[in-house]
Every structure is written in structure tokens, then in C-alpha cells.
Amino acid sequence: MAERVERRLTTILAADVAGYSRLMRADEDDTLAALTACRAIVDGLIAEHRGRIANTAGDSVLAEFPSVAEGLSCALAIQGEIAKQAEPVSPDRQMRFRIGLHLGDVMIKGGDLLGDPVNVAARLQALAEPGGICVSAAVREHVGTRAAAAFADAGAQQVKNIADPVHVFRVDPRPNPPPQAGEGAALGARVGAAAAPAPLPLPDKPSVAVLPFTNMSADPEQEFFADGIAEDVITALSHYPSLFVIARNSSFTYKGRTVDMKEIGRELGVRYVLEGGLRKSGNRIRVTAQLVEAETGNHIWAERYDRDVADIFTVQDEITEAVTITVAPAIADAELRRAIRKPPGTLDAWAAYQRGLWHLSVFSPDDTALAEKFFTHAIQLDPTFAGGYRGLAVAQYRAAVVFQKQGLSEALSSIGALARRAIALDGSDAASRSFLSWAFHLEGDQERAIVEAERALALSPNLASAHRNLGTALLLSGRPREGLALLEASNRLDPRDQHGLHNHLNRVATASYFLREYEAAVEAAQRAIRAFPDFPGPYRWLAAALGQLGRAAEAKEVLEKAISVSPGAFDMYVRKGVPWMRPEDHAHMLEGLHKAGWEG
């Protein structure tokens, strides 16, 4: 009887080692040992992402995945882990993989993958740089806005033994790579993992998303000016309680992409979208802005502003006022809050601040360090600009708590002082009050954290971070059910922020665990891990919840991952304890971890 051939649509990953023959010629034993170590990483990550290895030969691997998202996530994880493995090795001896990813209808015979889609994946792999990933248009289209990566369009490529050209996209693992000369925003958007599969419902009041303004200048340096205009317009609009305003992190996921307004309206759950552009020539700027009704695509309002560069903050105020009056005509003149935002005294300080914000958005230790430098420079240029102090506080928090690059106690003292300085300079700065709430939370003073978050919301009802910080303070002061409601409100205002998503899910897992709803804690922690597998927090709650449920084997495996993914974070949260967690909550966490097999 002939062996049965199965057909199915699947995601194919092809990988090999760049320059493998050269490495073998130089040192066979060393290369084989390195390959064995790397293959252990690759095979483990494929299994972790629900993949199946179909073929292996020498230094190459062919695998399939049940979804494009799993395949791309695995490819990114492989390149990240292999890069870490290679760091101590001299560049000429480093083992780096090339990866190709394609979605296609394959034949499966005896477990082997056959057909043209397999050949396409192999050709994509050959086009990738060492340490790089190339994907087909089918993968890029299917992923849409659900990948924690950016895509550079490499165009149609004619490849060996494939009749039609293959449209290739190169993958940059950073969510929002910096603009390069001649490219502008063409490298693609920072696309968050918080995408919802179904359209979000419209709020019960006028809702608007402000897209990042387009840099229409030849100079890529103007990207920061364009981003800054949109950032400040979002901040200003957020002060109006009669509006529903999507947070910057979510609206900026569309940066550099051509997206249908109807799609944006559905994905963000808003009625209106504001878009615009900036062109700078010498000391003059031209800013264009237009307000579009997302459902119909109709232009509601449009304006062009030709000004001196020094008048950029006035332009921001005029755009804010025009949008507010247009989408919410019931707002009385007395409610217009043009003076609620205190701009910096110099344009250079504002530009340095915008650069710091960009580096914060990348969410890596190196970019966090660069963000600190830019925020410090902004303070040096204008010591009265509250934003510089707030940005520096955020960067120091991330360096100490997220990446363990600074001492915790020293960082907490500095963070609180910076937040208080920002408020002393501008008491109406809701974002600074929100961060002061977070500083109090980190110090373990949840009651004062609640007060400051409520003050921030009184100033800016649409401020997602204030909802999140208030929810977190309630959660960690013994009121997890109330905290969950605020966390959901924050997520609705910022539905597409990748890093916001895993933080949100981590807090949902925490709240569910404190409520002893362990199944819900497991689900939220697993979703957080899928969104950002290098984030250590969810592993701890997942291990503890599995331990409480008596799922010992699973719990022990996750516990080992919780320790290995960030030993420093495990030591800080578990062995030492953190000031923002109540002793009874810490004991509850330890109880679950002990049931998971931790013997500390």
C-alpha cells in the first residue's frame, strides 16, 4: 500500500549556520561542540513554541508551527538566545544562524515536509544575514500588527528554482528601529502584541486616536520632531474628560505603515483618527493635520500651519483646540485647557526629551541607558522642564527593577526625588503625578500611591498609566478585585502596547493569584509569557499557581525557567522580597513556589 500523503497549511521555518563550512575548516571539534550547544537551544525553543522538527541535516533545521505567530516568535527567540551564546566568542568564531519563514500548503509524507513552500522557506533563509530573519509576504500579511518586531520591505526577489519572484521582508527584532538616512519610517511600525482579534466597541463619548505625524523632510532627524508633535497633542487631548483618547504606545504602533482608517478604527475602537505631517526647512516648519471619521473615511477637518520653528508649541495648542471643538462641540470655552501643559523653555530640551522617549520605547538595557543620557541632557538644557525629570525617573526605574542594572534602594530614593521635582516644577503635569504614584508604590506606601494616581486622573482622565498605577496600588494593598477593574480600564485606553500588554497580564495573574483564582492566574501568566517570553514576572506567578493546583511536574519546570530567565529578579522578588509587596502576599507567593518545588 502506498504511503499516505497529507496536505496542510503550515508555517515553515528553515534555519542554518552562516559560514558553517569555514568554521569546520578552522576547527572541527570546537565547531561541532558549538553546534551541539546551539542545537539544544534551537530544538528546545521549537518545542516551547509548539513546533515540530521535520528534517535536520548537518547544520540545517526544518520545522513547522501551528501558527505564524508561534513561528515568528520562535525565530526571534532563537536569534536572541544564539546571540547571547555567541557574546563571549571572538567575532570570527561566532556561530550565527540564518532563518527563513514562510506560510504555505505543504505535502507531508512520513513526517517530512515537501513541496514549493519548503523551497521558498529555504530561499528566504539563504537571503537572511547572519543572525537575521527573512519572511515572505504571506507571513508579513498574516502577522499584521501582532508581532513584537519591525519589518523592512526588501521587495520582490528572484530566487533559485522558484518560478515567480518572492516578496521578502527582513525582520528587525526591535519594536521600533531608529530612523536611518533615506529610510524615514519605511522600516515599518512598532507593532504591539496587544492586538485584539475582534473590533473593540466604541466608548460612550467621542473617541480619538492620534497617529504619529509623518516626517516629510529628507532629514531623518526630524522624525523626533514629528513624533513630539503627536505626543504633545495626545497629552493635551487626554485632559478632556468629555473625550476618550487612545494612549501614545498604542497609536504609535501604526508608525510608518499604510493602514486603512477603518481598520484603525476597528482595532482601537475609536470614531476619529487624527493624522498629520511635518516638513522643516531652515527655521520654518509646515505642519499639516487632518481629522478623519474612521468608519466612513470622511475628512472632518484639515488645516495647514506655516510657522517659525520656535512656534511649534503654539501649533500643537492650535491643533488640540481645533480637534477638541470639532469632535466635542459641547465643550465650553472655559474648559479649554491650553495652559495645562507647560512646554520646555528651549526647543533643544524638548528634542532631547523626545529622543529619550524613543529609546524607552525599545525596552532594552542598552536603550534604557541611552534614554537616561538624553533625559539628563534635557534637564541640563532646561532645568525647569518637568518632562526631563519624569523621563529620567522612568529610565532609572526600568534599569533597577526590570533589568537589575542599578541597586534597588539607591534607585528608589532617586526615582522618588525626581518625580517630586517634576511636580514641583509643574503641578498640573498629570504624567508626573502618575509616576509619583508609582514611586510611592515602589516604596510600599500604597495609600499615598492611590492618592497621587487619583490626582493624576482628575487632571487627565484618559491617562492610561494613572489607571494602571491606581489599579496596581489597589491590587497590592489588599484590594485586588478593585485593582482588576482599573487595570482593564488602562488596557482599553492602551490596547496595542506590547510591553503594556505583558505588564497588564502579569498584574492580572498577580491579582488572580491573590484572589486564589489559580486557574485564571495560570491563563493570564501563560498569555504574558507568550507575549514577552523574556519577562521574568509571569513565570513566578505561573509556577506558584501551578503549585497551588497540585500540577507538580509542570510547576517545577516553570520554576526552573523562572530562576534561569532572570536570576537577579528571582533573588530580588522571592529570596529578599520587595518593599511594594505586603508580607502576607509575599508569604502566599512563597507557599505556591514551595509547592512547585522551590527549597529556598
Image (cartoon, rainbow, N blue to C red):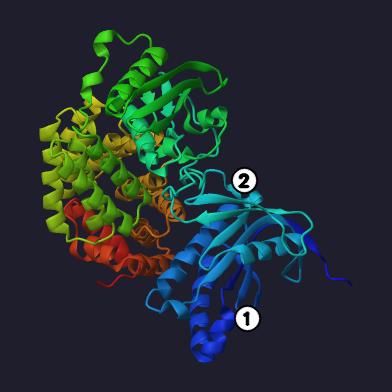
Quarter of the C terminus within the rendering: bottom left
Residue drawn 27% across the image and 28% down it: 310
**Which residue is labeled 1 in the image?**
58
* Number of disc labels: 2
Residue 479 appears in the picture as rendered = no
Amino acid under label 2? Glu
Q: Name the image quarter holding residue 261.
A: top right
Q: Position of residue 129 (x, y in %)?
A: 55, 65
Q: Position of residue 464 (x, y in %)?
A: 32, 35
Q: Position of residue 351 (x, y in %)?
A: 28, 39
Q: Residue furthest right?
A: 1
Residue 230 appears in the picture as rendered = yes
Marking on residue 377: none
Q: Position of residue 390 (x, y in %)?
A: 20, 41
Q: Secondary structure at mark 1?
A: loop
Image position of 24 (left or right of 471)? right
Amino acid under label 1? Gly
Q: Secondary structure at mark 2?
A: helix
Q: Name the image quarter holding residue 596.
A: bottom left
Image vertical order of residue 368 relative to residue 446, above or below: below
Residue drawn 41% across the image and 29% down it: 210
Crowding around mark 1 (Cα neighbors within 10 Å: few <14, some 14 to 19, many 20+) is few
Image position of 360 (left or right of 201)? left
Quarter of the N terminus within the rendering: bottom right
Q: Nearer the viewer, residue 16 or 495?
A: 16
Q: Nearer the viewer, residue 203 or 71?
A: 71
Marking on residue 141: 2
Residue drawn 43% across the image and 58% down it: 533
Crowding around mark 2 (Cα neighbors within 10 Å: few <14, some 14 to 19, many 20+) is few
